[in-house]
Image (cartoon, grey):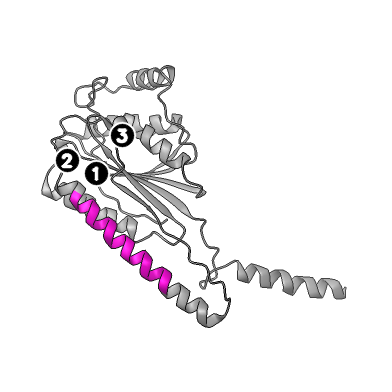
Amino acid sequence: MKAIKFILPFILFLLFLSCNGKGTPEKPNKIVCVLFDLSETTNTPEIRKTYLNRFKFVLDRMQVGDAIEAALITEKSVSELNLSIECEFPVIKNKIGTELFEKKYKVLADSILDMKKDSLLKVADSVLFKPKRKILNTEIISSLQVAERVFKSFPQPRKILVVFSDMIEDSKHYNFERENLSSQRINQIINREKKDNLLPNISGVKIYVAGATAKDSERYNNIKNFWFEYFKNCNANLESQNYGAALIKFDE
């Protein structure tokens, strides 16, 4: 009986240590892959400014131990040579262990975090508003192979994909402006991607889409249906509230 009385408070103490100051468990670190659609259909100051503002929204939620990578959606997404943004936010460990030094290390870590975020925002601004060339086609599907490689390259347990795009595929294989994206056609496209071994392995990845649009509601819904079915076949997690014209919430 005495042993139980001793063990119970000890367990509660361990639970307290595993929580943050608000009393809730801290989330595991995350790797965020961001895809920027640079095609001409998104090349307006209003759209690009929205992308930049929402990217800042994502950056604001990055913590020490997280990582973020950004790639481009272009007419040759899968063969773009460089990722536009690559950054890991380092964990600075307090080797001394005192409360005073713990506070100093936290201030230092937060300062480095803020500087890196500011730097990344400037890079994103340059990418979005000073593109090196005109992008006339949009290979969204192939860009997801780049995302797959990003997620396989990082150890962070939480994988998050943010796609800033109108989601209108316009490649040599598919043109969603003209395609009749019926259920049958959607299945045909996905089965073809499977057959050609081009469906990305992004199992467990949580997905956010910001910027989705179309010329009318019917086409918008057909394109939306395609992407929900596509990501379902990739075993990824795209929820209805996380797909749309705006990135309303990024609670990560």
Residue 203 location (% of width, % of height): 49, 36
State the residue position of label 3.
Answer: 224
Q: Three-letter amino acid code at disc 1?
A: Gly
The answer to whether residue 221 is magenta is no
The residue type indicated by label 3 comes to Lys
- Tell me the residue at 76%/71% (across/down): 8
Position of 162 relative to 111 (above/below): above
Mark 2 nearby-residue class (10 Å; few <14, some 14–19, many ≥20)? some
Q: Which residue is mark 1?
A: 211
Q: CA distance from mark 2 to mark 3?
A: 17 Å
Q: Answer yes or no: do the residues labelled 1 and 2 have beta carbons within 8 Å?
A: yes
Q: Which residue is mark 2?
A: 42
Hey, which quadrant is residue 77 in on the image? top left
Q: Nearer the viewer, residue 81 or 11?
A: 81
Residue 207, placed above or below residue 181: below
Foreground: disc 3 or disc 1? 1
Numbered disc 1: secondary structure: loop
Write down the region rendered in magenta: 108-126
